[in-house]
């Protein structure tokens, strides 16, 4: 069985030590009436060529979602 990881978003993407690093966050409850606060949860580290390959795959998926009407292109 494959391990699944949930993230509410990406906190940071940075390049250090010749690797691309994604710091994922999850939203954690704050106080009463306050907005949830993002807290680091997982980090993915990959070489630049893997990052470019992933970026290409994401762009292809975005194009499919636009074609399916799930997303609309921002014309700004």
Image: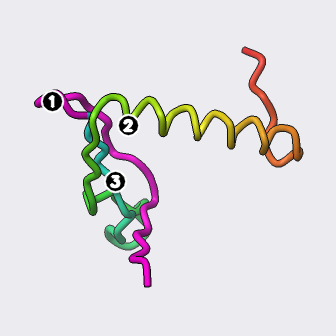
Task: Please tell me how many numbered marks the rendered image carries.
Answer: 3
Magenta region: which residues?
1-19
Q: Is residue 57 above or below residue 73?
A: below
Residue 38: within the magenta?
Answer: no
Query: Label 2, label 3: how many angstroms apart (C-alpha)?
Result: 18 Å
Q: Is residue 66 above or below residue 37?
A: above
Name the outermost residue toward the left: 17
Residue at (11, 30) in percent of width and height: 17
Viewer-side residue, 50 vs 64 = 50
Label 2, on which residue? 50
Left/right placement of residue 52 relative to residue 16 reads: right
Q: Are marks 1 and 2 in contact (CB under 8 Å)?
A: no
Where disc 3 sits, the SS reads strand
Density class for disc 1 (Cα within 10 Å; few <14, some 14-19, many ≥20) is few
Instruction: Residue 19: give x, y in percent of width and height.
Output: 21, 33
Residue 2: within the magenta?
Answer: yes
Name the outermost residue toward the bottom: 1
Q: Quadrant of the N terminus?
A: bottom left
Label 1, on which residue? 16
Instruction: Residue 22: give x, y in percent of width and height.
Output: 31, 44
Label 3, on which residue? 24
Viewer-side residue, 6 vs 51 = 51
Instruction: Using the rendered view, name the quadrant where residue 34 is placed.
Output: bottom left
Instruction: Residue 18: give x, y in percent of width and height.
Output: 16, 27
Query: Label 1, label 2: how many angstroms apart (C-alpha)?
Result: 15 Å
Instruction: Using the rendered view, name the quadrant where residue 16 is placed.
Output: top left
Residue at (39, 63) in percent of width and height: 27
Where disc 2 sits, the SS reads helix
Residue at (38, 37) in percent of width and height: 50
Dot placed on the residue nearer the N-terminal end, 1 or 2 = 1
């Amino acid at each position: 069985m494959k391990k699944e990881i949930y993230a509410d978003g990406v906190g940071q993407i940075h390049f250090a030590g010749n690797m691309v690093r994604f710091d994922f966050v999850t939203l954690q409850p704050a106080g009463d009436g306050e907005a949830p606060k993002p807290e680091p949860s997982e980090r993915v580290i990959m070489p630049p060529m893997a990052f470019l390959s992933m970026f290409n795959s994401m762009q292809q998926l975005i194009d499919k979602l636009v074609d399916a009407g799930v997303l609309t292109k921002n014309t700004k």
